Amino acid sequence: MPHEPVLLNEIISILELQPGAVVLDGTVGNGGHAEAILEKIVPSGVLIGLDQDASAIERSRERLKRFSQQVILKQCNFRYLDQALSEIKISEVDAVLLDIGVSQEQLDDAGRGFSFRLEGPLDMRMDSRTEVRASDLIETLPEEELAELFYKYGEERRSRRIARLIVRERAKKAIQTTIQLAELIASAVPAKVRYGRIHPATRVFQALRIAVNGELDALSEGIQNAMKVLKPGGRLAVITFHSLEDRIVKRAFLQAKADQKAQVFTKKPIGPTDSEVMCNPRSRSAKLRAICKL
Ligand SMILES: C[S@@+](CC[C@H](N)C(=O)[O-])C[C@H]1O[C@@H](n2cnc3c(N)ncnc32)[C@H](O)[C@@H]1O
């Protein structure tokens, strides 16, 4: 199933885009939000689409080809969005969108190692030019650091027990694949958790992905840099999928408000409607927050 953009109507309404607007989509992914944004800003608007995953850039290029005169796509981490804009001589934009996390295409590609349901190498790099894979962390981190990583980035209650098991297992045999790790984690939890609603490896996989891609630091820096490139009156919208990310966005927005640099539109985050969750279960945990630069 192709990636469905989440909270699409909410994004379009909160960004209040006009024809001619210049918009930066920092996570262009499959181009779903970008396509709807372009429909609002044509004929003279420009969309700059960034993604750190080269295959996402290629997919968006294909999807957005009817707008080729209005689109600039670039493989880049959005934490460097200010540099990406200065390289193409754009100094300010009317709106920035960050739709954090993994796309369905990344999850469905077994070779990328994001899914604990598909057999593949323990990779999890969104940008394949970077060096550290999830298997490097699993193979080399000391037990205490593994436990801390699972606790801090996965909020995993059984972090110590899982770390101990990994260290014991890797002394016997290298842990190189997704299913190998997922089964090991499942063996560390009680049967009622093993067969519960959420797969027991969910939190550990989340933690590894966050660490491999430096996701939380990228988010903080991305928001700061977005504030630098927005015009006064420009809007920043961020969609997150778990509480660690949402906390970062909430705090950054409150700080911008306290510094009188922004007006916050979303005192509480906006979530999906019941009908969106029915059509697109992945939207279930999405939270949208938005600000306007003063
Ligand atoms: C949820 S998808 C975005 C989907 C997109 N909005 C759409 O409608 O198709 C998230 C995308 O963000 C990218 N991504 C995540 N963190 C990133 C970062 N720090 N810099 C650039 N791209 C990032 C991922 O590679 C992935 O393609």
Image: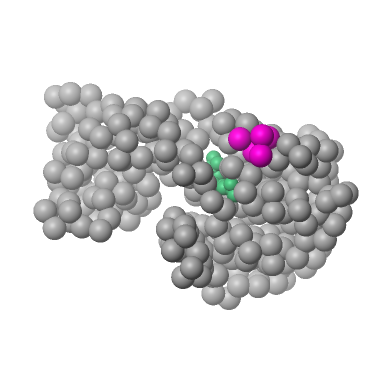
Residue 250 place in picture, x, y as percent: 55, 66
Residue 179 place in picture, x, y as percent: 25, 35
| Residue 107 figure quarter | top left
Placement of the C terminus among the 4 image quadrants: bottom right
| Residue 80 in sight here | no
Above or below, 112 against 289 in this view is above
Q: Taking 87 as reference, is 180 left or right?
A: left
Number of disc labels: 0
Colouring chosen for the image of the structure: one colour
| Residue 146 figure quarter | top left
The residue closer to the viewer here, 202 or 18, is 18
Above or below, 49 against 172 in this view is below
Which quadrant does ligand 1 occupy? Answer: top right
Q: Taking 195 as reference, is 293 left or right?
A: right
Q: Residue at x 74, y 56 (%)?
A: 95
Residue 47 place in picture, x, y as percent: 76, 46
Q: Residue at x 66, y 34 (%)?
A: 62
Predominant SS along the magenta part: helix
Q: Residue at x 33, y 29 (%)?
A: 120
Residue 10 falls inside the magenta stretch: no
Above or below, 129 against 151 in this view is above
Q: Residue at x 12, y 54 (%)?
A: 190
Residue 185 place in picture, x, y as percent: 20, 43
- Give the magenta range: 59-63
Q: Taking 190 as reference, is 125 left or right?
A: right
| Residue 146 in sight here | yes
* Residue positioned most to the bottom: 267
The residue closer to the viewer here, 123 or 169, is 123
